[in-house]
Image (cartoon, coloured by chain):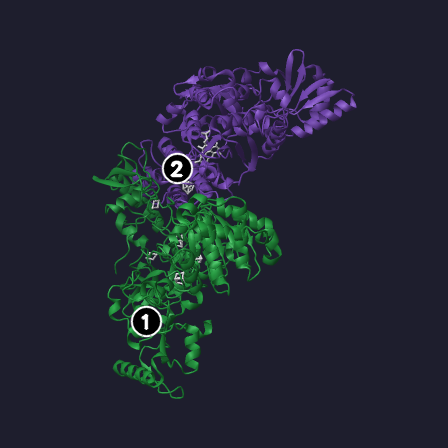
Chain colours: A purple, B green
Amino acid sequence: MITIYVPRDSSALSLGANQVAAAIQQEADQRQISIKLVRNGSRGMFWLEPMVEVLTVQGRVAYGPVQPEDVASLFDAGFTEGGQHALSLGLTDELPWLKRQERLTFARVGITDPVCLDDYLAHEGYRGLRNTLVQSPEAIVAQVTDSGLRGRGGAAFPTGIKWKTVMVAQAEQKYIVCNADEGDSGTYSDRMIMEGDPFVLIEGMTIAGIAVGATQGYIYVRSEYPHSIAALNLAIKEAYAAGYLGRSILGSTHDFYLEVRRAAGAYVCGEETALLESLEGKRGLVRFKPPLPAISGLFGKPTVINNVISLATVPIIMDKGSEYYRDYGMGRSRGTLPIQLAGNLKHAGLVEKAFGVTLRELLYDYGGGSASGRPIKAVQVGGPLGAYLPESQFDTPLDYEAFSKLWAVLGHGGIVAFDDTVDMAHMARYALEFCAVESCGKCTPCRIGSTRGVEVMDKVMAGTDHVQNIALLRDLSDTMLNGSLCALGGMTPYPVLSALNHFPQDFGLSEAGVNKKERAA
Amino acid sequence: MDKQTDYGTPASRNTEQQVTLDIDGHSITVAKGTSIMHAAMQAGISIPKLCATDSLEPFGSCRLCLVEIDGRRGYPASCTTPVDEGLKVHTQTPKLADIRRGVMELYISDHPLDCLTCSANGDCELQDMAGAVGLREVRYGYEGSNHLSAEKDNSNPYFQFDASKCIVCSRCVRACEETQGTFALTIQGRGFDSKVAAGNFDNFLDSECVSCGACVAACPTATLMEKTVIESGQPEHSVITTCAYCGVGCSFRAEMKGEQVVRMVPDKNGGANHGHSCVKGRFAWGYATHRDRITKPMIRKSIHDAWQEVSWEEAISYAASELQRIQSKHGRNAIGAITSSRCTNEETYLVQKLVRAAFGNNNVDTCARVCHSPTGYGLKQTLGESAGTQTFDSVMQSDVIMVIGANPTDGHPVFGSQMKRRLRQGAKLIIADPRAIDLVSGPHVQADYHLKLKPGTNVALITAMAHVVVTEGLVDEAFVKARCEWDSFQYWSEFVAQPENSPEAMEAAIGVPASDLRAAARLFATGGNAAIYYGLGVTEHSQGSTMVMGIANLAMATGNIGREGVGVNPLRGQNNVQGSCDMGSFPHEFPAIATFPTMPPAPCWKMPGADRWITSQACASPICWTLRLMVASRRCIAKVKTLPSPTPTPSM
Ligand SMILES: Cc1cc2nc3c(=O)[nH]c(=O)nc-3n(C[C@H](O)[C@H](O)[C@H](O)COP(=O)(O)O)c2cc1C
Ligand code: SF4
Ligand code: SF4
Ligand code: SF4
Ligand code: SF4
Ligand code: FES
Ligand code: FES
């Protein structure tokens, strides 16, 4: 029996993985070769998807990108024994892209059958939970705190400290909520975990529940992620059946119930308080803080709300210890970050690296430079609310503090690259337009400001009352930055002002920021 | 016209802990949980605000009230940030001025510039704030996206909704939810497209709106505005008064222009209504100056003559001489008077005094004879005082609310809203009523038990509940031993415990499944503070007094008397039922409910000086209830009735 892997990840599916899998099965049947087809997660090399792997005595051998019409020739080339073919990529483990990564959170993604509990267990799964079950809540929270793990959803708040607040809060009911709304443009690491290793998220949430005394968890999954929802539901069902969820987990005194909830389809519902409103069945409107969700969250009860990656990183910390995780990284950014390369890059995909890797390494050593072959002019890091960084800042290491010194953010670890054909004024306008479309409409600076911002940008780009409108753009940015209720309105000035400050010429200003037309006059 | 102070956010419910902080250099001590905005206002420092008002929970949306706090990042909103010990807060800094002006500039970039012709001119918080932050220009121009051509909704007969003036502060939506509990309004759309909508309906009239006007009162602009203000402009003075409609007795400020009422604004200091009212009190005041009202005295000699307008002097002396004439011809008992529970204590006191001192008899009665006497009698027999035991506010401490034969959301709307507020906070609800009143199932309110008893079976129901309490060991014996008469209790408990009083035995008679009745009784006895609210569905039955006693007994047996959140609560027909009775309007009771024929100066006589006017004839006179009074007057025994205002005949 030959084991063949064809990813079930959405990125592979969108490139024809299902058709490839069907073709392989059909071809094998025809040739009377008995195969076991495993639908694994993606290895994160999107330019090679659908990437098919075959298990051989040397290890797993990769082929890609494979299309259904390549299948017959692959069989002809003896790919079931690792035979050479034009699409041969060699041993998967030796692929430089993968070899140079530090895959901790993504340790199993692409390797296992995501919805097979036995496979999960065979690959060190649920060891973290077993360690958790013999520890006190204080010890678990201390271990997470000591690991230095910070929230990967955007705000980088220390996960252990958040858990501690919920742990000490007194309440009859507490909740664990996983933020899987993943709305940032150019990000997909949450999705890859949910589709490629859902058990690690389930395990992480169960540990969180035991640590803080919560018995109910919800995963709020972006509605555009049907494959994630399906994979999670399959995995949750298996976990219940095997006693990893439900009453008295693994015979312990702990109960933990878990449910998937389909999100409302709005970017702002990724903001934690709007998410809670949405989970409660209300309009996705942002709540003011305090009270923090940790004190008064879902249905007014103490609630841990964490990003997928934050929670999926907990099992390895509980398995291998806080030092193991903390030893990766730099400064106050400990461990690894699953970085998502996107935009105008030759090689887009997922790179899990310890903090400290520079933007340049990521863009060139991993990304292979721009896809267009033109110079990379700017990158936006941290989603649609992240700042644009010019080439002069590409040597910045990925580190929360280093980025914040540059008035930039790491956010959820998405990096979108633009070549020199991009008009940064257009990008600034786009940021405001995004805010206008996605604004929940609760607070004035964002509700009215985003729409006015687009109008002001139109005037700037048309050269109407140029000096006055640039000044107005800055004043408006200031109002939004300081006045907005949440980070949607509050951080929209990041892309706007970083574009204006780093690329004044795109806004009709000289390098020094002086108006060209005014100077001529 | 003086305006009532708006503290921006409700007062803190924490009355025990105090916090001291510094706001703009003033040291201020306030209750823990108070917002910085409220604390500042207490010290006379007003922070700009638009989305906050002290009748509603803070919302944090306008972003005008931002402040700076030493040692804290950013600019927290003072309406949503609670005070903390030792905070140093600055409410006016150059940076805050910039942010506030920036926010106002955005607001005004989507607002019609017609303040001079606007109905809210002079009473518009948006106008006030533009002034407060010193807005001088709107650099965005007026060509951009806006809502200036949004249509007016004039469907509601009492108020207009002019969407072009809306600043989307959600105060109306929140007022409809929090204050009124109707949930008729919502914000539709997102971002710039957000707008107020009457649910899924096209306009206010078609929607679930009950025209209570809470949203109108909460609106800071001209968007929701009383039509009377649109017609006549801003009022110039106000007069405190009380709504004459229902038993809640809401306090109002009648806002006037000369002699003309412009609008009725519920008084924030009103103990019964705390600034809320229903459609009747707020909008149905056309009678106040209606031309059909009789404002001049008139007399006629016989029912066949036409009414004749005369001077007050003539009217009074004619009435007095006629009273004397009838009395001298037909005897002392030939005349009497009926008082109204819509009149003040002073008025009813004077009427009964007139009867007892001048007429020299006890021929006085009150309209509350119909709705209240079973309560008066039943509670006097059981609790020793013929009065309800709680204030309306007590309901905010109740954990279990039992409503019997009353429909608060219709009959006592403002109290109904308060009760719904408590129910939304999680109190449990038992309804004993044949009808599916609105409380049975409404927005965010759902009765835990609806006992649909057959009409006329109140006493059987309350006795069956008592049966469950006694036989299942749910009596609060410590309470009964300490506060009740043990022998009477034993007698009662033996009676109710008889098998024929069990829910099962009574099931067919009452028409309520025994299991529901048992469960409701258990909930009442064990669910924490349990309060009973009842109305005319209890008292206007032939067994009304017995049922009131049954209610009082159940409350006593379960220890639900004598503190906030519990008690026996009659919902009365009119706003001064208690007062008019206390003033001696009943023929068998002197003022302060001194029982006839107790002669002054007996120990329970509480009205100093009354012995000077109570005539010995009155003390010796028989008592004469309304019904007898009426019948008697038909038979020409009592010849004259003095009627302050009620219409007793139809209600008998
Ligand atoms: C507009 C907006 C959208 C957001 N979207 C997401 C999201 O899709 N996923 C996420 O994990 N966090 C998102 N966040 C951040 C969350 O509010 C919150 O900080 C996070 O879920 C906390 O989890 P963590 O501590 O594990 O990062 C968003 C924040 C804002 C302001
Ligand atoms: S900043 Fe925008 S998204 Fe956030 S609360 Fe305000 S209006 Fe809503
Ligand atoms: S009038 Fe009352 S019921 Fe109607 S929308 Fe306003 S608050 Fe709601
Ligand atoms: S109608 Fe009035 S209260 Fe309601 S959102 Fe508009 S301005 Fe605010
Ligand atoms: S609730 Fe009763 S007292 Fe209050 S306004 Fe309405 S009718 Fe008048
Ligand atoms: S008054 Fe505080 S945000 Fe509106
Ligand atoms: S003056 Fe018209 S809404 Fe304020």
- Find numbered disc 1 in the image and state the secondary structure of the residue it sits on: helix
Number of other residues with Cα within 10 Å of mark 2, as a class: few under 14, some 14 to 19, many 20 or more: some
Q: Is residue A10 placed above or below B234 in the rendered structure?
A: above
Q: Nearer the viewer, mark 2 or mark 1?
A: 1
Quarter of the picture containing the N terminus of chain B is bottom left
Q: Is residue A93 placed above or below B3 in the rendered structure?
A: above
Residue B119 horizontal/vertical position (percent): 34, 62
Q: Residue at x 53, y 34 (%)?
A: A218
Amino acid type at image mark 1: Cys
Q: Residue at x 31, y 53 (%)?
A: B125
Q: Furthest-front residue in view?
A: B487
Residue under numbered circle 2: A291
Q: Furthest-left residue in view?
A: B25
Front-most of residues B185 and A152: B185
Residue B609 showing in the rendered view: yes
- Residue A131 shown left or right of residue A227 in the figure: left
Same chain, labels 2 and 1: no
Amino acid type at image mark 2: Pro
Number of other residues with Cα within 10 Å of mark 1, as a class: few under 14, some 14 to 19, many 20 or more: many
User: Which quarter holds ligand 5?
Assistant: bottom left
- Residue A133 shown left or right of residue B52 in the figure: right
Residue B313 horizontal/vertical position (percent): 25, 81
Label 1 resides on the chain identified as B
Front-most of residues B412 and A355: B412
Identify the disc placed on residue B619.
Answer: 1
Q: Are marks 2 and 1 in contact (CB under 8 Å)?
A: no
- Residue B245 shown left or right of residue B136 in the figure: right
- Find numbered disc 2 in the image and state the secondary structure of the residue it sits on: loop
Residue A110 horizontal/vertical position (percent): 60, 22
Q: CA distance from mark 2 to mark 1?
A: 66 Å
Residue B194 showing in the rendered view: no
